[in-house]
Amino acid sequence: MTRHIRLAAVFCALLLAALLVNAARIQVFGAGVYDDNSANRRETIARYGKPRGDILVGGRPVTGSKDTGEQLRYERTYRDGPLYAPVTGFASQVYGTSFLEHAEDGVLSGADPMLAPFPLLNDLTRARNPGGDVVTTLSAAAQRAAYDGLAGRKGAVAAIEPSTGRILALVSAPSYNPEALSGNGPAVARSWVGLNEDPDKPMLNRAVRQTYPPGSTFKVVTAAAALDAEVVTDVGARTDSPDPYTLPGTTTSLTNELKGCRNASLRAAFVWSCNTVFARLGVRVGVTDLAATAAAFGFNDTGLRIPYSVAPSTFDTSVDRAQLALSAIGQYNTRATPLQMAMVAAAVANGGQVREPYLVERTTRAGGATLTTAGSRPVRQAMHPATAQQLRKLMTDVVRKGTGANAAIPGATVGGKTGTAQHGIGNAGTPYAWFVSWAQGARDLEPRVAVAVVVEDADADRGEISGGGDAAPIARAVMQAVLAG
């Protein structure tokens, strides 16, 4: 009898050992397979079981979390959703995340290991920490000024602090309310379809994900290349430029919107935006030097992140001389995001140095303790400091006595450059109105803000001056908001 009991005990021990081995196999070695199984909702339930951390502007949250009492308990809410949508993006229980909600999802959702006071314990318990917060670089006043300025129009605004690269405003219009995508009910699906089928593309972030022909605002880059290469040594000297200018190797004539551009100096050509002078300058500088200067400003950079990705602005390096002439005035294949053109203006304001732009100042735990900070940003020299100084003077002349008069701010020094970008088949599309600028207050030691504005549905009857008429007032409002802060 004792023998049978012993055998039964051994058999039970073997069964227990088999159970332990199988449990270890499932929980340790097979955990990843089960975690990734689409039928496993535990991770999803845990993800929405706690409030999400917030995105802050000027110390105030522009996001929140709503307790629904459902299985996926907390839904994302947004304060002034359309105003900040190009920055926050959306956090949807159905469609995932975008922009900052995506780039900083680990912190906001509580999944980032840095949020855990005892990481090893969290690994064992699989506990999820409270979501952390993301503190942005935005100026609430500048963001509002840009948004109100674009009201009812298609376009975008980007504003940067030249000395640091901090993004002060990032607006795209038309916009949308990300909260419409937060939950998981039928209304969310209808909103998703409606937003994606809207011909105005409200979910497109025009400030960083849409590129446009920059038109005459690119003449800042061409002027920098010409001065650095010493193709022009005196901005007041005549340039021996014909009007009209026949593009090299073609019978196509390039003309100007205004008279008085024949043999105009670089100073006069910049102030009144003479296409013929800058097209010829681009040919004289050559594709190698002009492309190198454009790259120094940030063109053809495919790796820029703020922290979410930015569409690369492009300058075509495989062009003939006629195409180069058009590229030098911001046409042909030259394309830029508003953020890129704000970087161009910022480089002029910052003595020729380009600071990499960034949107997140720091991330914090729920209690406010800092997790990460932006730290120092890489610096790139786009042009000689002396060239930047000359361009600052040229840009102030544009505002003082040229096409950018609508950007003038009493008591402040403002530099700018207008532009009208033709597009469409045979340039039949409504021109895009551009304005790039920077501003320095009377008591400031250096410029405090650089801005780029593009308006897609500008007044097509104003020619080159439309940038000054349509876009410059928006830039002025943004600059005033920053200088007043």
Image: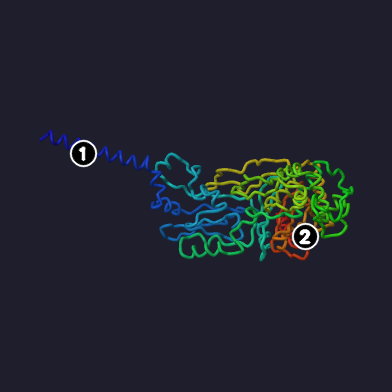
Q: Quadrant where the C terminus lies? A: bottom right
Vertical side of 386 occupied by 431: above or below: below
Q: Quadrant where the N terminus lies? A: top left
Name which residue lies at 34% across and 40% down: 25
Q: Name the residue under label 2.
A: 468
Q: Could you say which quadrant of the image residue 296 lies in?
A: top right
Q: Which is more toward the observer, 46 or 436?
A: 436
Look at label 1 and name its amino acid. Answer: Cys
Q: Estimate the x, y position of residue 472 in percent, counting from the top left.
A: 75, 59
Counting every numbered tag in the picture gives: 2
Q: Could you say which quadrant of the image residue 460 lies in?
A: bottom right
Specify few, some or many for label 2: CA neighbours under 10 Å numbering under 14, 14-19, or 20 or more.
many
Name which residue lies at 77% across and 56% down: 418
Q: Mark 1 points at which residue?
A: 12
Q: Which mark is residue 190?
A: none
Name which residue lies at 67% across and 58% down: 156
Q: Estimate the x, y position of residue 231 in percent, counting from the top left.
A: 83, 43
Look at label 2 and name its amino acid. Answer: Gly
